[in-house]
Amino acid sequence: MYELINAAGGSYYIQSPAKIGLVELGGGKVCLIDSGSDKDAGRKVRQILDANSWTLEAIYNTHSNADHIGGNRYLQNQTGCRVYAPGIECAFTRSPILEPSFLYGGYPCKELRHKFLLAQESDASELTRDVLPDGFELIELPGHFFDMAGFRTGDDVVYLADCLSSRETLEKYQIGFIYDVGAYLKTLEMVKTLRAKLFVPSHAPACEDITALADLNIAKVNEIAEKISAVCAEPLNFEEILRRLFSGLSLTMTFEQYVLVGSTVRSYLSWLKDTGRLRAGFDNNLLLWERI
């Protein structure tokens, strides 16, 4: 773990729970794409930088989930590097309490205020194309989170953040986190058209052809949508829908699973309603969902 792997030319990735990109900028300077989950990840990145006599110029965050921005503060304090995050992700990076608050839908209880969902804040600026290093291309990847983005480097390496999960992850967890299902499917269809020397997803093996993995993720989204529609054969409220899904998929409920899967299921319900596959209405002060 935390092995530095060369992708092509001066483009690398650090093998970690959420892969960290590292790109040489010339003159001994480098930038990172994401920073890992916490201070310990930041320390391990710092050891790699020191071992190669590299100076960290900037961190370009793909999005603001805690496992991607958790090393920001440590590395920024240690090196004085700039931190950039796209769109709404910048606000979440500056004020990380927004992530567990958004997921829970209110102030998060203490079981949700930990490093997996709540990173330390960092001094981030908005990521725009004009602050990217020479040769970088910004790739918009909405769906998994609000304004998630990926990058293509001058070495033709594409870092794809969290827009794809590995086969093993899909089989184990079944329902991957998605904020906007419609946007996510459009992103996956776009990703299928990309060509690169190497693709580096954060939570799947690096590969030269991303099409098969994108198709697998699309199929899983449609499978989960069908399961939710089937559960809603009769009018049900959200809590009962979630309970039946967990039981049917042999998942175990925890506070983390409740907010991560629960938020995702709400996104599926919105998408299924907006695309005419579910109806929703109030009965005796309960919001009920039903298949059309």
Image: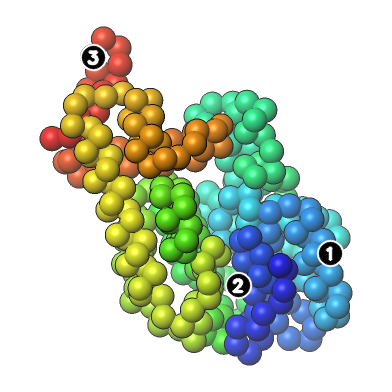
Question: What colouring style does the render use?
Answer: rainbow
288 or 232, nearer to the observer: 232
Q: Residue visible at 30% across and 12% down?
A: 285
How far is disc 1 from disc 3 in space, using C-alphas? 57 Å
User: Which residue matches tag 3?
Assistant: 283
Q: Earlier in the sequence, mark 1 or mark 2?
A: 1
Amino acid found under the numbered disc labelled 2 = Leu
Image quarter (top left, top right, bottom left or bottom right) of the N terminus: bottom right
135 or 162, nearer to the observer: 162
The correct choice, above or below, for 82 with respect to 276 in the image is below
Q: Nearer the viewer, mark 1 or mark 3?
A: 3
Mark 2 surroundings within 10 Å by alpha-carbon count, few (fewer than 14), some (14 through 19), many (20 or more): some
Q: Whole-percent x and y of residue 128? A: 55, 64
Q: Residue visible at 57% across and 87% down?
A: 155
The answer to whether the residues at label 1 and label 2 have Cβ atoms under 8 Å apart is no
Amino acid found under the numbered disc labelled 3 = Asp
User: Which residue matches tag 1?
Assistant: 79
201 or 219, nearer to the observer: 219
